[in-house]
Amino acid sequence: MAHVVTAPCTDCRYTDCCVVCPCECFYQDEKMLYIDPEHCIDCEACIPECPVEAIYYESNVPAQWQSYIQLNADRCKVLASNGLILEKQPALEGPGCKKIG
């Protein structure tokens, strides 16, 4: 099992969660972030850092976002050569972004 980035990350792409990850398993594209399920160790460090509450443990992903489990795995494979995030970056904050708090 792994953690999964879900719909609230779309158009936001805050990278606060990435910099606390001890496994370097976050990837990004032009829309959102993704967690590589093959490298995630389920430490939960990323969950409290996400300002849009988009990260869930795989077994706790809400029903409406179940497709994001496979999406994270698929996108990480595609982005493996150039999408790894190791440092904090400016947020995307597009029209679909709804920061909590």
Image (tube, helix red, strand yellow):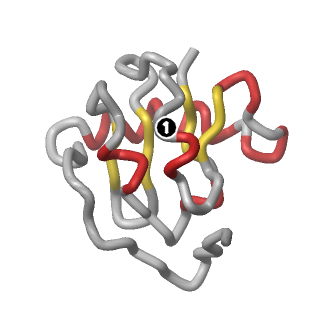
- Secondary structure of the residue carrying numbered label 1: helix
Which amino acid type is marked by label 1?
Asn
On the rendered image, what quadrant is the N terminus found in? top right
Residue 86, x across and y down, in percent: 20, 45
Residue 44, x across and y down, in percent: 53, 29
Identity of the residue furthest to the left in this view? 81
Judge from the rendering whether residue 100 lies leftward or rightward of residue 49; answer left or right.
Answer: right
Question: Residue, x 20% and y 52% (percent of image)?
Answer: 87
Where is residue 5, by image quadrant?
top right
Question: Residue, x 39% and y 29% (percent of image)?
Answer: 36
In the image shown, does 77 or 1 lie closer to the viewer? 1
Question: Residue, x 81% and y 46% (percent of image)?
Answer: 64
Residue 47, x across and y down, in percent: 56, 41
In the image shown, does 47 or 57 lie closer to the viewer? 47
Q: Which residue is mark 1?
A: 72
Q: Classify 10 Å Cα crowding around label 1: few (below 14), some (14-19), many (20 and above).
A: many
Where is residue 37, by image quadrant?
top left
Where is 48 relative to 11, above or below? above
